Image (spheres, helix red, strand yellow):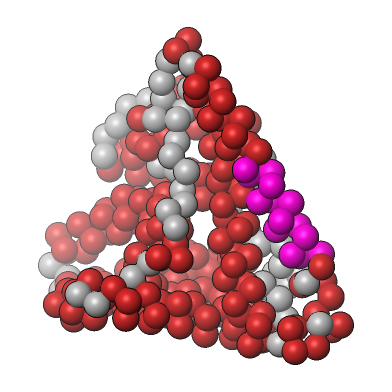
Amino acid sequence: MTWGLKLIAWVVTTRVYRHSYTVAQFIEFFFHPAFFVFTNDLNVLTPRRFFSSASNTDNFSPRQAKSTILQTLIGLLLLLAYGLVQNLYFKNLEQMGFLGTPWIGGAVSIATAILFHAANVYIQVSFLAPSGYLIPVDMNRPWLAISPTDYWRRMHFYVREYVYEIVIKPLMTWWLRKKTSVISARIALVAFIYLLFTFTQVGYQPYRQDRTFLVGLLVTAVFVAMFALPELLSPRFRRRAFLEHPWFGRILTLTLLYIGYAFIFMMRSGF
C-alpha cells in the first residue's frame, strides 16, 4: 500500500503541480534505504517535502552527526519500550485481570500509539540525515492537542500534508470546477479519504493480529469520526469550542481518543 501512496504522490506532483524531476530523483524517492526500515509516516512524504529537505552532504557537521546519533538512540530506546509493552501487556491480556479490560486498555493503546510512532520516526529521520535529507521529527507533543485536528497535526504532520496536498487540494479544485456544491464536495471527500485509509489500515498494521477488511473498516470509521467529522463543523463553532477554551479542547480530544481506542481494544482485544 505504501508504494501505491508514493506513486499517487509522484503522479499528482508531476502532472497536477507540474514539478519536474530526474530519473535519479525518482529512484531516490522510491528506494531510499530509510524507507525499508519501517512503514511509517515518512514513507508518505510528498516529493516536494522530500527533495526540499535535501542539503549538501559535504557540509554534514559534527554537530549534525551527534544529533543523528542521538536521534537513533532515542528511537531504539522508544522501540525497546514499545516491544516491552507489546510482550508484557498485549500478549498477556488474559492474565492481566482488570488491567486487561478496555477501561485500561484504551489508555494504554493511546500511549502505545504515540510510542510506536515516535520510535519509527526518530529512527527513519536519523537514517535519512547522513544522505543529506534533513527531515524534522514528525512528533510535536500530541498530548497537548487542543482539538482532534490539532492532535492529528501534532502526531502525523506528514500524513496530514500528504492528504491536503495530494488528495484534498486536487480533488476539491476539480469538483468545484465541475460546479459541485461545497457541502457535496466535502462529503465526497470524507468518503474518499475513508475508503483510502481503510486500505492502509488493512495493509499496514504489523503489530495487529487480525488484518481482515472488516477490522480495517472499523478502525478507519472510528478515526474518521474522531478527526474528519469535526472538520465539517463551522469555523466559528470550532474556534469557540477549541481555540478559545484550550483546556476544554484538550479534555474533549483526550476523551474522544480514549473512547475510540477503548472501542477498538474491546473489538480486537489489543491495539
Label the magenta part by its dominant secondary structure: helix
Q: Which quadrant: the C terminus?
A: bottom right
Q: Is residue 52 left or right of residue 184?
A: right
Q: Is residue 203 visible?
A: no
Please tell me whether residue 201 is drawn above or below residue 92 in the rendered image: above
Snapshot quadrant of residue 235: bottom left
How many numbered badges does the structure rendering display?
A: 0
Region rendered in magenta: 74-87
| Residue 77 position within the rendered picture, expressed as x and y whole percent measured from the top left | 69, 47
| Residue 165 position within the rendered picture, expressed as x and y whole percent measured from the top left | 31, 50
| Residue 2 position within the rendered picture, expressed as x and y whole percent measured from the top left | 56, 49
| Residue 10 position within the rendered picture, expressed as x and y whole percent measured from the top left | 41, 39
Residue under the point 13% across and 67% down: 179
Please tell me whether residue 11 is drawn above or below residue 141 in the rendered image: above
Any magenta on residue 161?
A: no
Snapshot quadrant of residue 242: bottom left
Quick one: 60 or 247, which is closer to the camera?
247
Residue under the point 32% across and 27% down: 20
Residue under the point 44% across and 12% down: 59
Please tell me whether residue 244 is drawn above or below residue 37 in the rendered image: below
